[in-house]
Image: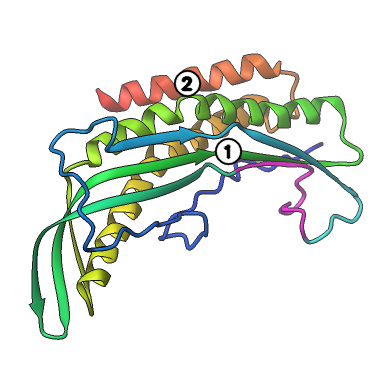
């Protein structure tokens, strides 16, 4: 019986210590245009095409690079990449001992979304296991299809928010505020996209018994999305 690894989606946030959350600092003395409402100039979200890769490994001796756990036979990893560049405007500043403390308003958000997916399959993979893992890929891609809309909405909401930064110089305080804003935006994206992806793929594994039953993949996928919708609808009520 094949035991298939459940969701192994990765997210890069400062809290988890991952590496792809990128901050591009704007010099503190720059003067981005202030905006009380988002505009085409203040918010930009781009989405790169999905990149899918399949890797085969020796089932009898998987190397250390193969991310299997226990008796798992295969796995599919998706990395919902989120790179963000935050622009801030100084609202107020003061010196507190050896530190400078500033209040900064977010005036610009530029985000880039990516989704690399890797299917790890053993050299003995059969049709059912391959189709099951490809079902994970389909789920990730479908969720990614709406990720740009989610990221745009979150970026719009971020414009005008205030963050406090501190550092040995005002430049450092400015960068600190930018970093805090980027971490917060990343957290929001993670909570909406990653939590949802984890739920749907868990429901998918439940429906297919991790690929060991004969439930058609396309039906299991649709059932999983429907169940996730019902759960969110019930939660809201």
Q: Secondary structure at mark 1?
A: loop
Image coordinates for residue 186, horizontal then vertical, percent? 38, 48
Residue positioned 12% across, 37% down in the render: 36
Q: CA distance from mark 1 to mark 2?
A: 24 Å
Residue 57, compared with residue 136, is above or below; it is below
Q: Secondary structure at mark 2?
A: helix
How packed is label 2: few (under 14 Cα within 10 Å), some, or many (20 or more)?
some
Q: Which residues are magenta?
A: 65-78
Residue 18, compared with residue 76, is above or below; it is below
Which of label 1 and label 2 is nearer to you?
1
Disc 1 marks which residue? 115
Q: Is residue 204 magenta?
A: no
Image coordinates for residue 94, horizontal then vertical, percent? 7, 72
Q: Main secondary structure of the magenta part?
A: loop
Disc 2 marks which residue? 227
Q: Residue furthest front?
A: 30
Left or right relative to 30: residue 221: right
């Amino acid at each position: 019986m094949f035991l298939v690894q459940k969701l192994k989606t990765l997210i890069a946030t400062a809290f988890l210590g991952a590496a792809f959350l990128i901050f591009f600092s704007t010099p503190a003395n720059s003067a981005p245009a202030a905006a009380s409402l988002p505009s085409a100039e203040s918010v930009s979200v781009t989405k790169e095409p999905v990149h899918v890769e399949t890797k085969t490994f020796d089932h009898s001796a998987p190397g250390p690079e193969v991310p299997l756990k226990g008796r798992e036979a295969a796995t599919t990893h998706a990395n919902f990449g989120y790179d963000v560049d935050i622009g801030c405007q100084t609202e107020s500043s003061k010196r507190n001992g050896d530190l400078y403390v500033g209040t900064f308003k977010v005036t610009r958000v530029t985000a880039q979304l990516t989704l690399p997916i890797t299917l790890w399959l053993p050299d003995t993979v059969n049709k059912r296991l391959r189709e099951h893992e490809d079902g994970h890929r389909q789920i990730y891609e479908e969720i990614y299809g709406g990720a740009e809309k989610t990221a745009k909405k979150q970026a719009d909401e971020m414009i005008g928010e205030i963050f406090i930064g501190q550092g040995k110089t005002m430049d450092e305080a400015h960068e600190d505020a930018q970093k805090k804003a980027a971490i917060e935006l990343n957290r929001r994206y993670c909570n909406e996209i990653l939590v949802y992806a984890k739920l749907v793929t868990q429901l998918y594994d439940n429906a297919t018994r991790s690929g060991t039953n004969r439930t058609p993949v396309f039906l299991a996928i649709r059932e999983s999305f429907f169940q996730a919708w019902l759960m969110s609808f019930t939660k809201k009520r």
